């Protein structure tokens, strides 16, 4: 047997091996605990809750606890200017001293946006489009039009505005919508002094019908009759009637003098 093989069986060899293993374990433990102490593993300062605070108060809190601060701004609807709306790291996170806390606050001035084209759009569609542009709907009014609940006009600050107009984000715009009555309301034609056949033709073209014919005076020629009055009649306060309404007329023989 060689001398090296004999040495491997000696106590000195076993002692050397055990010493080497022990040294490796000791160095590993020292490195682990030293690193934990150096980085303060599991220790630190808890980040306070800052969202909802005004920036002055948030800065005061962070300064008292030794944090650095970085501020950015964003416009948020229905939030007071200067309010903290986001923070990083989140509240409750443990961090080292002097850590920079990133805050996002609400801008003082709303950005300007272009009014989107919602003309002739259904109300529901217009509402979604305006919301996507950061705009709100204020009052809604109606006027006669065949397109029920479709946008006929957009108004801002009491004035009609066109697509592309520049207004502050977050503004309220008023909408004028069609009431759907345009399809069932037609103008009342003036039939007086027209012969009966012409009056009948005018009513048909207006979507109305001839009702009762009242004959005034002696009638000798039914082909030569003139309308002298009608019901309903067109006035300054009543210019339209329902589609299909029957118009009653009074006629006389010949032309009205």
Image (spheres, rainbow, N blue to C red):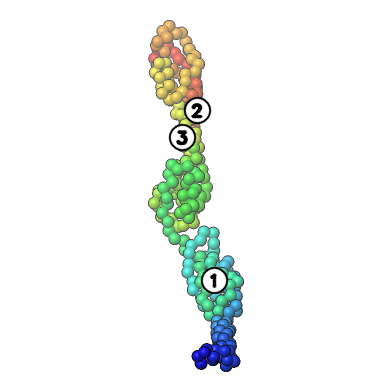
Which residue is drawn at the image coordinates 39% and 11% (left, top)? 224
Of pointers 1 and 3, the one earlier in the residue sequence? 1
Tell me the element at label 3: loop
| Residue 100 seen in render | yes
Classify 247 as above or below 49. above
Residue under pointer 1: 89
| Contact between labelled residues 3 and 1, with CB atoms less than 8 Å apart | no
Residue nearer the viewer, 37 or 27: 27
- The CA span between labels 1 and 3 is 56 Å
| Residue 82 seen in render | no
Classify 147 as above or below 84. above
- The CA span between labels 2 and 1 is 67 Å
- Specify the quadrant that holds the C terminus: top left
Residue 139 in the image: x percent, y percent? 52, 47
Which residue is drawn at the image coordinates 54% and 75% (left, top)? 59
* Horizontal relation, residue 92 to residue 214: left or right: right
Residue 92 in the image: x percent, y percent? 60, 71
Residue nearer the viewer, 170 or 124: 124
Q: Residues within 10 Å of mark 2 (few under 14, many from 20)?
A: some
Classify 215 as above or below 237. above
Classify 160 as above or below 4. above
| Contact between labelled residues 1 and 2, with CB atoms less than 8 Å apart | no
Residue 221 in the image: x percent, y percent? 41, 7
Residue under pointer 3: 146
Of pointers 2 and 1, the one earlier in the residue sequence? 1
Residue under pointer 2: 242
Looking at the image, is mark 2 or mark 1 nearer the viewer?
1
| Contact between labelled residues 3 and 2, with CB atoms less than 8 Å apart | no
């Amino acid at each position: 047997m060689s001398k090296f093989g004999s040495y491997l069986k000696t106590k000195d060899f076993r002692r050397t091996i055990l010493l080497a293993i022990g040294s490796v374990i000791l160095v590993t433990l020292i490195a682990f605990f030293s690193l934990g102490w150096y980085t303060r593993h599991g220790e630190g300062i808890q980040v306070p809750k800052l969202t909802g605070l005004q920036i002055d108060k948030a800065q005061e809190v962070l300064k008292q606890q030794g944090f650095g601060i970085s501020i950015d701004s964003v416009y948020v609807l229905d939030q007071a200017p200067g309010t903290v709306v986001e923070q990083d790291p989140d509240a409750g996170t443990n961090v080292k001293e002097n850590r920079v806390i990133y805050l996002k606050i609400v801008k003082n001035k709303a950005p300007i946006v272009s009014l989107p084209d919602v003309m002739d759009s259904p109300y529901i569609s217009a509402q979604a489009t305006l919301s996507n542009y950061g705009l709100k709907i204020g009052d809604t009014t109606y006027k006669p039009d065949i397109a029920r609940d479709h946008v006929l006009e957009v108004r801002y600050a009491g004035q009609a505005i066109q697509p592309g107009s520049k207004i502050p984000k977050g503004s309220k715009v008023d909408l004028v919508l069609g009431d759907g009555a345009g399809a069932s309301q037609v103008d009342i034609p003036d039939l007086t002094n027209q012969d009966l056949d012409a009056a009948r033709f005018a009513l048909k073209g207006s979507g109305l019908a001839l009702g009762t014919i009242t004959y005034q005076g002696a009638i000798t020629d039914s082909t030569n009759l003139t309308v002298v009055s009608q019901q309903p009649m067109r006035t300054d306060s009543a210019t339209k009637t329902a589609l299909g309404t029957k118009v009653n007329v009074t006629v006389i023989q010949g032309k009205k003098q």
